Image (tube, grey):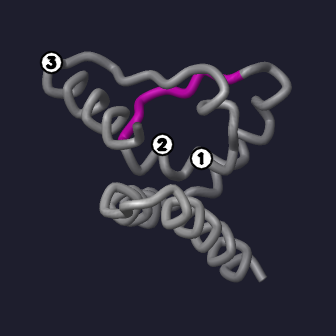
Amino acid sequence: MLYLIHRSIEAAHRHGKPAIVCGEMASDPNLTPLLLGFDVDELSCTPPALPMVRSAVRHTSLPQARELARAVLAATTLDEVQDLIKQYHQSEQADKA
């Protein structure tokens, strides 16, 4: 599924259209770095999630997010994807300390 989302974003950009993700996925701040790494243009999230998603956007390094996206696209299982996202957030926390 993540591969299809990534390919849809690429296709939108190829055709000069913005790539917008909305709903539950866009509202999950844990997925914000991955979506930014996929080069999404906009996130449309639920109002309660907005402060957390904004914070995640502000604290995301685009080069690191793109590296995460490449690793996730190379993963072959859901467990690998979840581990990569967890490792990303752990390294972000370590960088803040």
Q: Bin the neighbour count of mark 1 within 10 Å (Cα to Cα): few under 14, some 14-19, many 20 and up.
A: some
Q: Earlier in the sequence, mark 3 or mark 1?
A: 3
Q: Bin the neighbour count of mark 3 within 10 Å (Cα to Cα): few under 14, some 14-19, many 20 and up.
A: few
Pinpoint residue 77: horizontal percent, then vertical percent: 44, 60
Whether residues under marks 3 and 1 lie with C-beta atoms below 8 angstroms apart, the answer is no
Q: Is residue 12 above or below residue 89?
A: above
Q: CA distance from mark 3 to mark 1?
A: 25 Å
Pinpoint residue 50: horizontal percent, then vertical percent: 76, 30
The local secondary structure at tag 2 comes to helix
- Name the residue type under label 3: His
Residue shown at the point (58%, 69%) measured from the top left: 83
Q: Kindly identify which residue carries mark 3.
A: 15
Quadrant of res 70: bottom left
Pinpoint residue 9: horizontal percent, then vertical percent: 30, 30
Q: Residue furthest left?
A: 14
Q: Kindly identify which residue carries mark 2.
A: 35
Q: Kindly identify which residue carries mark 1.
A: 31
Whether residues under marks 1 and 2 lie with C-beta atoms below 8 angstroms apart, the answer is yes
Q: Nearer the viewer, residue 82 or 16?
A: 82
Numbered badge on residue 81:
none
Q: Earlier in the sequence, mark 2 or mark 3?
A: 3
